[in-house]
Amino acid sequence: MFNLLKIRFNQGNQAIPDIRTAKINDMFRGIPYIATESADKTVESVCPTGAVKSTPLSIDMGKCIFCADCEKACKKNEIKFTNLYKMSSTSREKLIVNMHTDLKSYEKTAVQTRKDLKKFFGRSLKLRSVSAGGCNACEMELNACSNVNFDMGRFGIDIAPSPRHADGIIVTGPVSENMACALEDTYLAVPEPKIIILAGTCAISGGLFYKSPALNRSFIDKYKTDLFIPGCPVHPLTVINAVLSLIGA
């Protein structure tokens, strides 16, 4: 027992003190910076998900898997990925970044706090995680949101064991045909009021699998999404900051 207490004392508090201003590795690929109005059309052909358009030059972060192939294809630094991790938005359209996107302003305004959600969930939000055919990468990052480093539970945000105990669902994966019914059943089991969060490129657009006949994304078209969290996979800091902004916590 003495040794355990000694270890705990030496380790100290491992949680990130301020999740809103936390530093992240420079190698992390976050919001892309677009330097010009257009680029050579070859930049479109290297993108495996069709996220890049050359004229006008833009990147759809809802489709982007952050592989940086487009950045490598640009010989004049038309595209440069930054390490800004606050990429989420309450608007699908805002995920499309171009030359006129103010990155600093984007971080502060892309996620709009809803007064109704702040009233209901500002002090406690329970989400049911649904893996709808994903590769398990985003799911692992969601698990990391609750570890000692990120500790989103200190903000009252937790993953619920049952949809009946949840305030909404957080969806990962491209939504395969086999998961389509289970996803909708889970959502319908959540009591009102409730929210839908799409976490990761696959959930937002289908990602690499967007053309696959094995997908059934009718749920995404049928119900309104409250929050889009880009990433492949999503980063815990991206997830937590987005949810905190959404509920005004």
Image: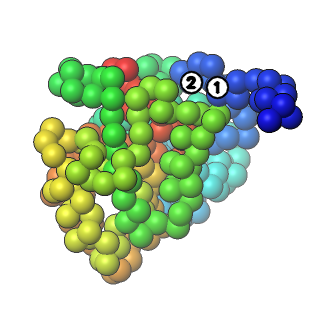
Q: Is residue 14 above or below residue 161?
A: above
> What element does badge 2 sit on?
loop
The crowding category of the residue bearing disc 2, from other C-alpha atoms within 10 Å (few below 14, some 14 to 19, many at least 20), is: some
| Quadrant location of the C terminus in the rendered image | top left
Q: On the rendered image, what quadrant is the N terminus found in?
A: top right
Label 1 with label 2: CB-CB less than 8 Å: yes
The three-letter amino acid code for the residue at tag 2 is: Ile
Q: Residue 63: image x %, image y %? A: 44, 54
> Is 191 displayed left or right of 10 in the figure?
left
Count of picture labels? 2
Q: Residue at x 69, y 52 (%)?
A: 72
Task: Identify the residue at image location x=33%, y=34%.
Answer: 125
Type of amino acid at the residue the image marks with label 1: Ile
Reading the image, the residue beneath label 2 is 19
Q: Position of residue 191 (x, y in %)?
A: 16, 46
Label 1 – label 2 distance at C-alpha: 6 Å
User: Would you identify the image quadrant in which residue 207 lies?
Assistant: bottom left
